[in-house]
Image (cartoon, helix red, strand yellow):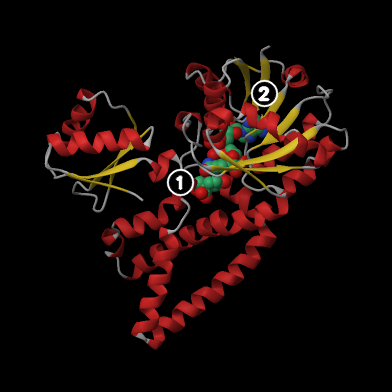
Amino acid sequence: MTKRLLLIGIGLIGGSLALAVKRGAPDVRIIGHDAHLATLAEALRLGVIDEVATDFDAQASQADVIVLAAPVRQTKAMIQHLAQLPLQQTVIITDTSSTKATVEQTAAVLTAQDYTFIGGHPMAGSHKSGVQAAKAILFENALYMLTPANDRAAARIPELQHYLEGTKAHFLISSAQQHDQMVGMISHLPHLIAAGLIQQTAKYTKRLPQTIQLAAGGFRDVTRIAASNPKMWTDIILENRDNLVELLAMWQNEVALIQALVANGNEEAIHAFFAEAKTYREELPNKQRHALHGYSDLLIDIPDYPGVISEVTSVLAAAHISLTNIRVVETREDIMGILQISFQSTQERQRAKQVIEQATSFECSVLE
Ligand SMILES: NC(=O)c1ccc[n+]([C@@H]2O[C@H](COP(=O)([O-])OP(=O)(O)OC[C@H]3O[C@@H](n4cnc5c(N)ncnc54)[C@H](O)[C@@H]3O)[C@@H](O)[C@H]2O)c1
Ligand SMILES: O=C(O)C(=O)C[C@]1(C(=O)O)C=C[C@@H](O)C=C1
């Protein structure tokens, strides 16, 4: 029987989730609601949703699953609204917010009425936003955190996972509080540091104006996420404030240690510092890399002449290999750098590597 999924907020995450649900459970009908009418029209055009929620309250009351994928504070406001409606008693309500504890506290208005609330957070994304950036493969191989509000909700996790099968994500269950501590460390603090690094660079560039022109691969890699949506990140930081204040104090200690290390100039200690970091970085669990960021990417060292990219894509087309993403990783803005191509799977990547190396003299490598 067709199930009805109401999606609230059809941006990068909501849109990607909708596409993934369709892939895994084609009998699910996706009804979309968004604060922006233009987004709804675009979501319909792109086939992300099947229908627009023209009568929100009535359609919420008929939904089997409700997915909230708006920015965190809007999600909390929508939860308050949903709690006023006569929802189906069997409905599963979930969200995608990057913070979980305050959302779960807000969802007490739902659980008090015996509705099922399972917090959700797919640990994959991008600095891009909006439905145009949505991709069915965004969550492939990513971790997908689930934070059930109570035992009753925990018992229904398999049902929710069934809807989310098409994400091809790996699920991890935790408490909302622990989620916020861990994600504070691995996602929120890095975003603050990346933005802080950009701020420092901007100030420094006033002193030495040419500084910014020297920004090469290292600076770009470490600051990519500083280009993320400021509205979304303001919400996240405000909602995870206490953990972040603590994490920033730990970071200050870390910076003090690094400062002492550099000031002391002890070669062995500096080498050990980088060697330990390298080992830890290289041991990052592979399955946590998702399809868009390295898991099945091929790096091609291309020379700088017109038509070189189409030369590579023609070789792939001739071998019937589809790519899912392509970009030039700029090491300098005025020269060609590395061509980074993503494939659906590591097998496709392997095939691509073989055909490109056979047909060209370009060196290919993979991210491990
Ligand atoms: N971007 C990421 O990397 C990422 C990853 C995982 C989780 N998240 C979380 O997922 C959620 C969505 O993030 P996103 O990147 O898709 O943002 P986005 O800006 O791409 O999309 C958000 C959408 O919500 C809509 N919206 C805003 N207020 C609304 C309201 N009151 N009712 C209905 N729709 C409303 C917006 O119009 C927009 O279409 C956020 O809570 C974010 O913290 C983001
Ligand atoms: O890849 C990125 O651009 C992201 O920032 C994704 C990222 C992260 O890894 O920090 C950002 C926010 C989310 O809540 C989950 C994932």
Q: Position of residue 76 (x, y in %)?
A: 73, 40
Within 10 Å of the Cα at label 2, are there few (<14), some (14-19), or many (20+) other Cα atoms?
many
Left or right relative to 159: residue 204: left
Q: Amino acid at mark 1?
A: Arg
* Farthest top residue in view: 1
Q: Amino acid at mark 2?
A: Leu
Q: Which mark is residue 6?
A: 2
Residue appearing at x 78%, y 40% in the figure: 107
Q: Which mark is residue 289?
A: 1
Quadrant (top left/top right/bottom left/bottom right) for the N terminus: top right
Label 2 sits on a secondary structure element that is strand
Can residue 230 be seen at all in this image of the molecule?
no
Tell me the distance, in whole angstroms, between the alpha carbons under discs 2 and 1: 29 Å
- Height in image: 32 above or below 184? above
Residue appearing at x 37%, y 40% in the figure: 296
- Height in image: 120 above or below 238? above
Which dot, 2 or 1, sits closer to the camera? Answer: 1
Q: Position of residue 306 (x, y in %)?
A: 13, 36
- Height in image: 45 above or below 307? above
Labels 2 and 1 touching (C-beta < 8 A): no
